[in-house]
Image: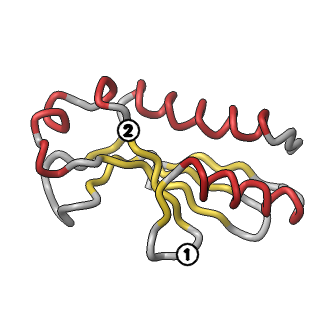
Amino acid sequence: MRSYLIDEIQPSDMAKVRDFLTNNALPSELGEIFWVPVPDDLLSEKQYHHRGCRPHVLAVELGNNWVKLECFVRSLKIMRCECQAYCTLQQTLFLINFVHHMLEDLDIKT
């Protein structure tokens, strides 16, 4: 899996991250995984035309002192579909910017 890892986060800051994601992303049934919806204008052509697969999302996983961003676009409705794929460059930048802005807004230093 292609991913982006931010580690060495203080436990008190992880609580702030969890709260932020609870309010700004979609929770999952998997506990420490949150879904960040991909804006329609960043969907690939195939993803855009697969309206029945929406929302298309990116996973953010939390650990004890780390945040991992998975660079893979998934559907929350269908387990397997050809529209699910590794991120385009624009989708990857969107996800990285989402988390960098989160860290900046929460004043978290790593």
Per the image, label 2 sits on a secondary structure element best described as loop
**Which amino acid type is shown beneath numbered disc 1?**
Gly
Categorize mark 2 by other alpha carbons within 10 Å: few (<14), some (14-19), many (20+).
some
Residue occupying image coordinates x 70% and y 58%: 19
**Which amino acid type is shown beneath numbered disc 2?**
Val
- Where 30 sits versus 13, above or below? below
- Where 45 sits versus 78, above or below? above
- Where 103 sits versus 69, above or below? above
Question: Dividing the picture into quarters, in which one does residue 12 lie?
Answer: bottom right
* Residue 13 locus on image (x, y percent): 85, 56
Indicate which disc, 2 or 1, sits on the residue closer to the N terminus.
Answer: 1
Which mark, residue 71? none
Question: Dividing the picture into quarters, in which one does residue 105 lie?
Answer: top right
The residue singled out by tag 1 in the image is 31
CB atoms at circles 2 and 1 under 8 Å apart?
no
The residue singled out by tag 2 in the image is 38
- The colour scheme of the drawn protein is secondary structure
Per the image, label 1 sits on a secondary structure element best described as loop
Residue occupying image coordinates x 19% and y 38%: 47
**In front of the other: 15 or 63:** 15
In what quadrant of the picture does the N terminus appear? bottom left
Residue 107 lies left or right of residue 4; in this view the side is right
In what quadrant of the picture does the C terminus appear? top right
Question: Dividing the picture into quarters, in which one does residue 65 lie?
Answer: bottom right
Residue occupying image coordinates x 14% and y 35%: 46
**In front of the other: 93 or 50:** 50
Using the numbered discs, state the Cα–Cα distance from disc 2 to disc 1 in whole angstroms: 20 Å
Residue occupying image coordinates x 23% and y 30%: 44
